Image (tube, rainbow, N blue to C red):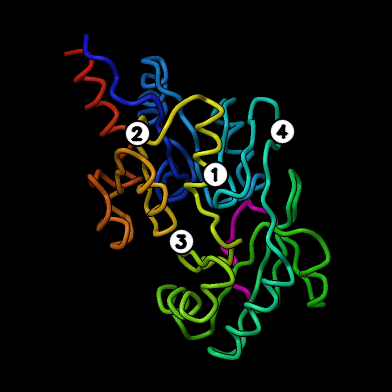
Amino acid sequence: MTPFPYKLVATDLDGTLLRPDETISRRTRDALAAATAAGAAHIVVTGRSVPWTRHILDDLGYDGLAVCGQGAQVYHAGEHRLLTSVTLDRQLAGLALSKLEAEVGPLALAASRDGLDGEVLISPGYRVQEGPLPYLPYEDPAELWSAPLNKVYIQHPELDDDALALAARRTVGGLVDVVMAGAGIVEILPLGLSKATGLSLAARRLGVKGADTIAFGDMPNDIPMFAWAAHGVAMANAHDDLKAVAREVTASNEHDGIAVVLEELLRGRDG
């Protein structure tokens, strides 16, 4: 029997592991279970902070490590414990936002506070996706900076996500990192932080390396993770920038793209 070729399966959540209705199909659950039974660890790697991820992991019965907040947080799901957390320099972030607004005009802002129960703050005018994820509106700008943050979300009334991310990188890319993580989700992060940095920390705890890893994703914020992993698989619904660097493109998140690849790998093992 051929060994399963990877020791680690790293999966993004939104647009990748989750279907559009934010559920995970039975087929995908079974494929991941079979991969772990064959000796691979599974790590969820998501842009969501821990408070917005925990309920999904609990529903999965997931008790391993998860990388949250674009790599800022390594979370032990089984112990409900934050192992590592990187925060954004608030003074530096404020300077970056001032420079960016001088270039492109006023922005609507949101921010993810640090910690297991950190709130997501939403400014007036910020377009938030309706659903079960909690957020806290604020009026006073000082409130945004009153507690440690993992990241700041930015939106512009006219620029689309690609144009806003490009303008932000060009204007303040030497101060902070800028990623696009989904529709309407452009984020300001600590300089040097990415899903790859968080994933490498989590993988080290498991004794595995990038060369042992297959990674699945759908957005440009997954590009560093694909660069770190041995094999990057983009979903059919992925952003073109991610498809351009992927080793493989699978079916969409709605059509069990993760399961399609894992089942093929498992068949090779059984064959």
**Sequence order check: which comes first, mark 3 or mark 2?**
3
Residue 56's x, y, as percent? 57, 38
131 in magenta: yes
Judge whether residue 140 is colored magenta: no
Label 2 to label 1, Cα distance in Å? 16 Å
The percent position of residue 6, horizontal first and vertical second, equals 33, 26
Which is closer to the viewer, label 3 or label 1? Answer: 1
Q: Are marks 4 and 3 in contact (CB under 8 Å)?
A: no
Task: Of the two numbered discs 4 and 1 on the same chain, state the one appearing first in sequence.
Answer: 4
> Sequence-wise, which precedes: disc 3 or disc 1?
3
How many residues crowd around disc 1 within 10 Å: few (fewer than 14), some, or many (20 or more)?
many
Q: CA distance from mark 4 to mark 1?
A: 15 Å
Residue 99 is situated, as x and y percent measured from the top left of the image, at 61, 85
Give the structural element (helix, strand or loop) at label 4: strand
User: Tag 4: residue type?
Assistant: Arg
Residue placed most toward the observer, 4 or 78: 4
Q: Which mark is residue 81?
A: 4
The first of marks 2 and 1 along the sequence is: 1
Q: Nearer the viewer, mark 3 or mark 2?
A: 2
Q: Report the amino acid beneath label 1.
A: Gly
Which residues, given as a range, are shown in magenta? 126-134
Q: Are marks 2 and 1 in contact (CB under 8 Å)?
A: no
What's the magenta bit mostly, secondary-structure-wise?
loop
Give the spatial CA distance, label 3 vs label 2: 27 Å
Image mark for residue 211: 2
Q: Quadrant of the N terminus?
A: top left
Q: State the residue position of label 1.
A: 198
> How many residues crowd around disc 3 within 10 Å: few (fewer than 14), some, or many (20 or more)?
some
